[in-house]
Amino acid sequence: DSGVTQTPKHLITATGQRVTLRCSPRSGDLSVYWYQQSLDQGLQFLIQYYNGEERAKGNILERFSAQQFPDLHSELNLSSLELGDSALYFCASSVASGLNEQFFGPGTRLTVL
Amino acid sequence: AQTVTQSQPEMSVQEAETVTLSCTYDTSESDYYLFWYKQPPSRQMILVIRQEAYKQQNATENRFSVNFQKAAKSFSLKISDSQLGDAAMYFCAYRSAYNRDDKIIFGKGTRLHILP
């Protein structure tokens, strides 16, 4: 158990819908990262937040957005869902930015039908 | 942009034997970190080992060791005395050492089967 929690574990929804994935980082961790793991694209970095502010952005679609709240939990919002958005979404956290190890949560499996 | 390549989609090894997983990467940066992550059927991403590019000595963690060849941009993982619990997907990964960007870049992975 990495100490990072993600909810829900599984999510099944239809095309065109909007979902919110939630992540609680390890106690004391200020940085949160979101990754997408799909069969065709592999594991890809989406976005990073550090202490409530966006720090780095990867291949995140405009239909996706994220935020980190004052209590440091983070949410990833996915809208206008398409079949290709079906994937495993990981959240990771680290103490700060920089070298510190990123600890991964168990992931949320999103299935878009 | 940095890239990570794992040329072996799948590998098999007999229990108790040694296996080496290959990884090459491309970067123009001089300072960076390399990782091997394990993803068992539970899907949890587990850090196996990491290497700082400025260190010449190869990292080791119990039965896991790496062969880091900076000039060749190669970073292979050796698993000694393979155990059934080592069966998993293994990802090679790269991270810049510069604070402007903390993202980890992953390879496509190598699925390792352990034969009893």
Image (tube, coloured by chain):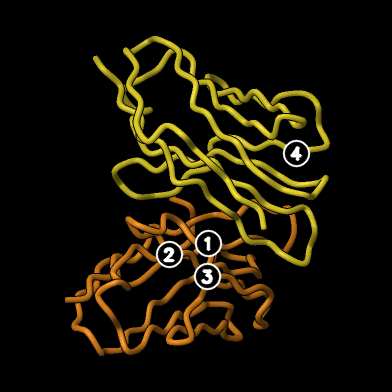
C-alpha separation, residue under disc 3 versus residue under disc 1: 11 Å
C-alpha separation, residue under disc 3 versus residue under disc 4: 24 Å
Q: Residues within 10 Å of mark 3 (few under 14, many from 20)?
A: many
Q: Which residue is mark 3?
A: A46
Q: Residues within 10 Å of mark 4 (few under 14, many from 20)?
A: some
Which quadrant of the rendered structure holds the C terminus of chain B? top left
Compared across the picture, whether B86 is left or right of A52 comes to: left
Q: Residues within 10 Å of mark 1 (few under 14, many from 20)?
A: many
Could you say which is closer to the camera, residue B57 or residue B63?
B57
Q: Are marks 2 and 3 in contact (CB under 8 Å)?
A: yes
Q: Which residue is mark 2?
A: A36
Q: Helix, strand, or loop for circle 1? A: strand
Chain letter corresponding to the colour yellow: B
- Residues tagged by mark 2 and mark 4 found on one chain of the structure: no
Residue B69 position, x and y percent, is: 71, 27
Q: Which mark is residue B52?
A: 4
Q: Are marks 1 and 2 in contact (CB under 8 Å)?
A: no
Q: Which residue is mark 1?
A: A92
Front disc: 3 or 1: 3
Q: Are marks 3 and 1 in contact (CB under 8 Å)?
A: no
